[in-house]
Amino acid sequence: MENFGVQNADYKKSDMNTIIKLSQDGDIKALEELIRRIQKNVFGMFSYLTEKRQDIADLTQEALLKTAKCINSLKDTKCFKSWLNHIVTNTYYDYTRKHSKDTNVDIDEDKLLEIKDKIGCEPGEKCLFSEMDKIIKYALLNLPDNLRVVIVLREFEGLSYEDISRLTNTTIGTVKSRISRARGKLQEQLKEFI
């Protein structure tokens, strides 16, 4: 029997729409390639939403499993990013409902000052970016969930106000207000560092 699908070596060269369509047709290798391509992005989103490394890994795995199980529910492959963001957002909301006591993270101010001191002391641009990334993550984790989710979707995922509105089941006005409040709180928290 002749295989009309993509050859194994060609999965990495195939465009995203082809990989998604093949995944929807039950091609396991294509689904593996799809998961490989999106896993870093999904992990990155969760790393800005929660602090605990194990929770980030668990949430990532859960979102990737949901993606694999529900890939056939995606109607238009061009909407994949939005569809995936919906899965990530809902997975995070489910997590916060289960862990409602832990929604706000207490940030150790001494730890932030220690990081700030390191920025001035350690050479190398890579170190500077790594330390700034940590500071930004700490500041994001200090935001309430409703502000953290919208700012991550807007600034890190580049979603429109309309897309964020749909994902969070809120009005566009509420989204704009939350993004504005999140930016203000981040600016206040980061003023010593920038």
Image (cartoon, rainbow, N blue to C red):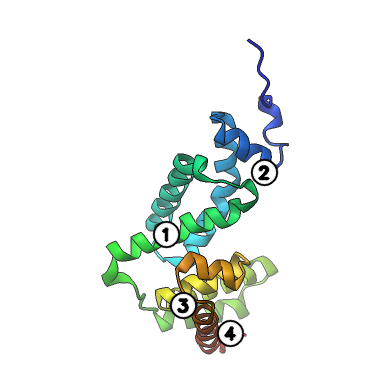
Kind of element beneath mark 4 = loop
- Foreground mark, 3 or 1? 1
When asked about the image quadrant of residue 12, the answer is top right
| Residue placed under numbered mark 3 in the picture | 147
C-alpha gap between disc 4 and disc 1: 32 Å
C-alpha gap between disc 4 and disc 3: 21 Å
**Residue 134 seen from this side:** no
- For marks 3 and 1, the one nearer the N-term is 1
- Foreground mark, 4 or 2? 2
| Residue placed under numbered mark 2 in the picture | 16
C-alpha gap between disc 4 and disc 2: 38 Å
Kind of element beneath mark 2 = helix
Residue at 26% from the left image edge and 71% from the top image edge: 101
| Residue placed under numbered mark 4 in the picture | 193
Side of 55 where 98 appears, left or right: left
| Residue placed under numbered mark 1 in the picture | 90
- For marks 4 and 1, the one nearer the N-term is 1
Amino acid at dot 1: Asn
Residue at 56% from the left image edge and 52% from the top image edge: 40
Q: Nearer the viewer, residue 36 or 5?
A: 5
- For marks 2 and 3, the one nearer the N-term is 2
Kind of element beneath mark 1 = helix
Residue at 53% from the left image edge and 29% from the top image edge: 26
Q: Position of residue 174 (x, y in %)?
A: 49, 81
Amino acid at dot 4: Phe
Estimate how packed mark 4 is, as few (under 14), some (14 to 19) or many (20 or more) residues with alpha carbons within 10 Å: some
- For marks 4 and 3, the one nearer the N-term is 3
Q: Position of residue 76 (x, y in %)?
A: 61, 47
Q: Position of residue 62 (x, y in %)?
A: 41, 48
Estimate how packed mark 3 is, as few (under 14), some (14 to 19) or many (20 or more) residues with alpha carbons within 10 Å: many
Q: Position of residue 112 (x, y in %)?
A: 47, 80
